[in-house]
């Protein structure tokens, strides 16, 4: 990644935090809603966690949900440069990049889990994470 600076990182782990299908919910294709949320965290191992939660509902009843967490190890020198008295301030560009990877990972996990089922028709669309991450992220 190069946004005027370089931040070496690696994807350490992918965790399925939550996955559920509710086949008893009648899906009205004209009334399917998608809700997406991102959560961020950090630990003392130079890791940033990006969690992506996707929820499909129809007529306000959830019929499919998934939450995937991706743990990224940040190179020590960069990690140390993020440290402030308030916590770690991770640049918006890096968090956006990590979020794009996490969203794509979630899309792939959902496809794999729903393959050969009627739920496979529900694909996580492309998401413009720059609209969701508008500033540097403070991790405490």
Image: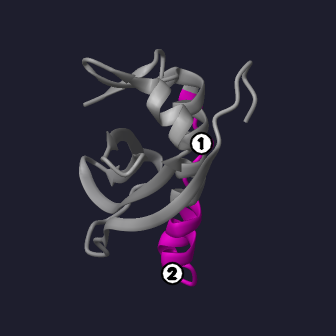
Q: Position of residue 76 (x, y in %)?
A: 51, 42
Residue 129, picture quadrant: top right
Frontmost residue, 94 versus 24? 94
Res 123 seen here = no
Which of the two marks, 1 or 2, is nearer to us in this view?
A: 1
- Which residue is depicted at the point 47% across and 65% down? 13
Residue 100: numbered disc:
1
Above/below status of 7 relative to 82: below
Name the residue tied to disc 2: 117
Above/below status of 40 relative to 45: above
- Which residue is depicted at the point 52% across and 22% down? 91
Q: Which element type, helix, strand or loop, lies under badge 1?
A: helix
Relative to 92, 62 lies left or right: left
How dense is the environment of label 1, judged by Cα within 10 Å: few (below 14), some, or many (20 and up)? some
Range drawn in magenta? 107-129
Frontmost residue, 98 versus 22? 98
Residue 39, picture quadrant: top left
Q: Which element type, helix, strand or loop, lies under badge 2?
A: loop
**Total labels drawn:** 2
Is residue 123 inside the magenta stretch? yes
Image quarter (top left, top right, bottom left or bottom right) of the N terminus: top right
């Amino acid at each position: 990644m190069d946004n005027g600076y370089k931040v070496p990182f690696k994807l350490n782990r992918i965790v399925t935090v939550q996955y559920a299908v509710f086949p008893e919910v009648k899906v009205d294709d004209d009334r399917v809603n998608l809700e997406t949320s991102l959560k961020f965290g950090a630990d003392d191992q130079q890791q940033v966690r990006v969690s992506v939660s996707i929820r499909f509902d129809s007529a306000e009843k959830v019929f499919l949900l998934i939450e995937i967490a991706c743990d990224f190890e940040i190179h020590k020198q960069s990690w140390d440069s993020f440290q402030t008295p308030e916590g770690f301030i991770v640049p918006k560009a890096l968090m956006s990049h990590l979020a794009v990877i996490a969203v794509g990972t979630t899309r792939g996990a959902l496809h794999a889990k729903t393959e050969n089922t009627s739920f496979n028709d529900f694909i996580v669309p492309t998401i413009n994470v720059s609209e969701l991450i508008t500033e540097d992220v403070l991790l405490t």
